Amino acid sequence: MKKIKTHALQPRDTLGLAMPSSPVNKEILNQATAAIEELGFSVQFARDFENDNPNFLAGSVSSRVGELHTLFVDPEVDGILCLRGGYGSAALLPYLDYALIAKHAKLLIGYSDISALHLALQQKAKMMTFHGPMATKLIDAPAFTVDHFMQSLTGERWSQRLQNPTHEPIKTLVHGVAGGILTGGNLSVIAGLMGTPFEIDTRGKILFLEDVGEEPYKMDRALTQLALAGKLQDAAGFILGTCKNCASKDYPKGDHVLAVCERILAPYGKPTVYNVQAGHGPYQLTLPLGAYVHINATHQQIDVLESAVI
């Protein structure tokens, strides 16, 4: 499959800040802008900021779609960094002009609810994107997160072995080796797109999953949905990221998230690693979605074998 790779970014470049999901307040916006500028980037917006937005959506569908189209087309914008996730980006998918976006392809960075955009751009526009920290998460991010973010955006270490902080080792759930295109993101968002024109394609791919604030039974429900749809059988292997605040309130002594993953994923016998620091934790690897990766689950190794930028 022919893929569209975007240009690597440099600290002198301009990042367009987008809110395709939920809003941020003015104070957080200023802090995020300052954090991005401290990294050497300029910042640009495509629409007026509405302070103290009382809603859970950062504007109407048309305003959020227009924002993305404007940032992609604007020649002064070199890449697009989402301000935050939250909820709402899936509603934009039917209205995005994928031909227009592909023609003006730029690197898109974000995670969580932004997973809907990642999947759509990967499958409808054939673009490679980055599952990485958003602008608001860079405000007080540890050096590990910032360093890997910058190395990924600039293409400084495109051929690399993904490594956690030393105190958070990658672990094995199912032994073996596998290779394939990296896809995935937030489990709840992925499950929510099933049965739509934007549902995930896992055929021969390495499926990355993470989540936040979902109890084990909800994780079980989402994984079961993917299993019933054949998405787990189709995948070549699994990378499990962080699952923050996913402990059970009603059954604290019952199954935890890892037990759920082991029960549902392990029977497929596909190479699987877990505790990969990507997702909602403070330590965040920036993952090149759409790139070819190789996992050696037996030795807890994940190698990116393809540049995500040019």
Image (tube, grey):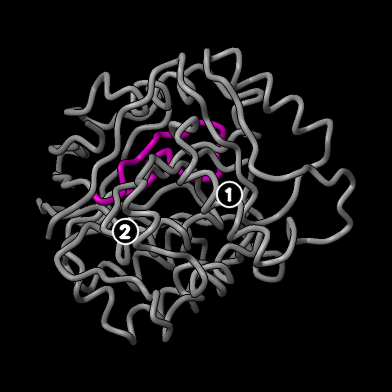
Q: Quadrant of the N terminus?
A: bottom left
Give residue 49's position: percent from left, percent from top.
78, 42
Mark closest to the chain's N terminus, 2 or 1 = 2
Residue 142 vs 258, above or below: the answer is: above
Q: Residue at x 47, y 63 (%)?
A: 116
Is residue 288 one of those drawn in magenta?
yes
Badge 1: residue crowd in 10 Å (few <14, some 14–19, many ≥20)? some
* Amino acid beneath label 1: Lys
SS category of the residue bearing label 2: helix
Give residue 140's position: percent from left, percent from top.
65, 23
Residue 26, image quadrant: top right
Q: For the residues marked 2 and 1, what is the alpha-carbon distance in whole angstroms?
A: 26 Å
Question: Which residues, given as a range, are shown in magenta?
Answer: 274-290
**According to the image, label 1 marks what residue?**
244
Badge 2: residue crowd in 10 Å (few <14, some 14–19, many ≥20)? many
Give residue 221's position: percent from left, percent from top.
50, 79
* Amino acid beneath label 2: Gln
**According to the image, label 2 marks what residue?**
122
Q: Residue at x 83, y 30 (%)?
A: 27
Q: Number of marks in the image?
A: 2
Is residue 81 one of those drawn in magenta?
no
Q: Magenta residues: mostly which secondary structure?
A: loop
Q: Residue at x 60, y 33 (%)?
A: 135
Left of 309 or right of it: where is 287?
right
SS category of the residue bearing label 1: strand
Q: Quadrant of the C terminus?
A: top left
Tag of residue 135: none
Q: Nearer the viewer, residue 204 or 66?
A: 66
Q: Residue at x 19, y 35 (%)?
A: 307
